[in-house]
Image: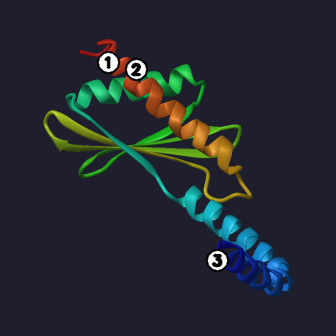
Amino acid sequence: MKQFFLCIMLCALASLQSGCVVAALGVAAAGVSTTVSAMDEEVSQSYPYPYWCVYRATHAALNEMAIPVSSIERTDEGDKFFATTRKYPVIIELREVTPSLVNVSVSAGNNVFQLDAATGQAIVNGVQDVIRRSLTAGLYQ
């Protein structure tokens, strides 16, 4: 009985073989669209620290990673840092959720033509890691 099902499955797969090229193109197109949408997304993390601690840790993270800040914009909910690394944009938003909880959103690059996905993800993760490390080490308390 198992051999019968195996034979049926092989016959079905053989008939689908001509569609493999179409499937491969579809998977490649899906990968490109996923990369583009991933670059538009932000990576957010909340920290249970006062706003000024997270603000100083953010400055330290950008300093440590040698990412110069071009401007800081005050918003209703917090601050927005605009920085560039090798001419690619890095935007960090700090939002005060409560007096002891701050949300940090980091995005790098606008699309795959400006910055490849791996580099953008490394920048975003690096900034979040340095902020987390600075806060947990108690440097800004």
Residue 134 at what x, y percent from top left?
38, 18
Amino acid residing under circle 1: Thr
Task: Kindly report the distance in space between the C-alpha atoms of the residues bearing marks 1 and 3.
Answer: 61 Å
**In this rendering, would 1 be left or right of 40?**
right
Residue 10 at what x, y percent from top left?
77, 78
Amino acid residing under circle 2: Arg
- Name the residue nearer the viewer: 42 or 14: 14
Work out whether 65 lies above or below 113. Answer: above
Instruction: Looking at this view, name the residue that lies furthest to the left.
Output: 99
How many numbered marks are there? 3
* Residue 20 figure quarter: bottom right
Residue 136 got which mark?
A: 1
Residue hosting label 2: 133
Residue 41 at what x, y percent from top left?
49, 57
Q: Residue at x 65, y 69 (%)?
A: 33
Amino acid residing under circle 3: Met
- Whichever of callouts 1 and 3 sits on the residue coming sooner in the sequence is 3
Disc 3 residue crowd, few under 14, some 14–19, many 20+, Cα 10 Å: few
**In this rendering, would 47 be left or right of 19?**
left
Tell me the mark number nearer the camera, choosing from 2 and 3.
3
